[in-house]
Amino acid sequence: MEKNLQDEVVDLRGECCPIPEMTASKKLRKMTPGQTLVLLTDHQPAVEVTLPALAKTLGYPISIQNEGDVYRVRITKR
């Protein structure tokens, strides 16, 4: 029986470092492998530096989409 793995979406617009990275780290620890964490942020340093560094350290794939004034950052737990 296949488990339903839903994405978890967290809106971090208006939050600056270290909040996006800390929130992502806490959420990912509680998630099941295969689940994807979707972060909505408007904080450029989180998009360019801290969230990619976190994903790289954990060995998780990351994708970033620019949606105008907000970025959609997807990190999938392995």
Image (spheres, rainbow, N blue to C red):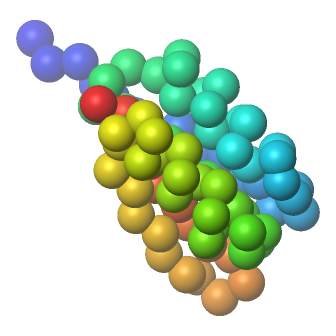
- Outermost residue toward the bottom? 68
State the image coordinates of residue 59 (x, y, percent, origin top left): 34, 39
Q: Residue at x 62, y 32 (%)?
A: 25
How many numbered markers are drawn? 0
Vertical order, 26 against 48 (above or below): above
Q: Is residue 58 left or right of residue 14?
A: left
Q: Is residue 5 left or right of residue 43?
A: left
Vertical order, 2 against 16 (above or below): above
Q: In which quarter of the image is residue 47?
A: bottom right
Q: Residue at x 58, y 82 (%)?
A: 67
Q: Can residue 37 be seen in this view?
A: yes
Q: Which residue is drawn at 87% across and 58% down?
A: 16
State the image coordinates of residue 50 (x, y, percent, origin top left): 65, 55
- Outermost residue toward the left? 1
Q: In which quarter of the image is residue 77?
A: top left
Q: Residue at x 52, y 29 (%)?
A: 28
Vertical order, 29 against 48 (above or below): above
Between residue 56 and residue 11, name the one nearer to us.
56
- Outermost residue toward the top? 1
Q: In this view, does 69 lie to the left or right of 77?
A: right
Image quadrant where one finds the C terminus:
top left
Vertical order, 77 against 71 (above or below): above
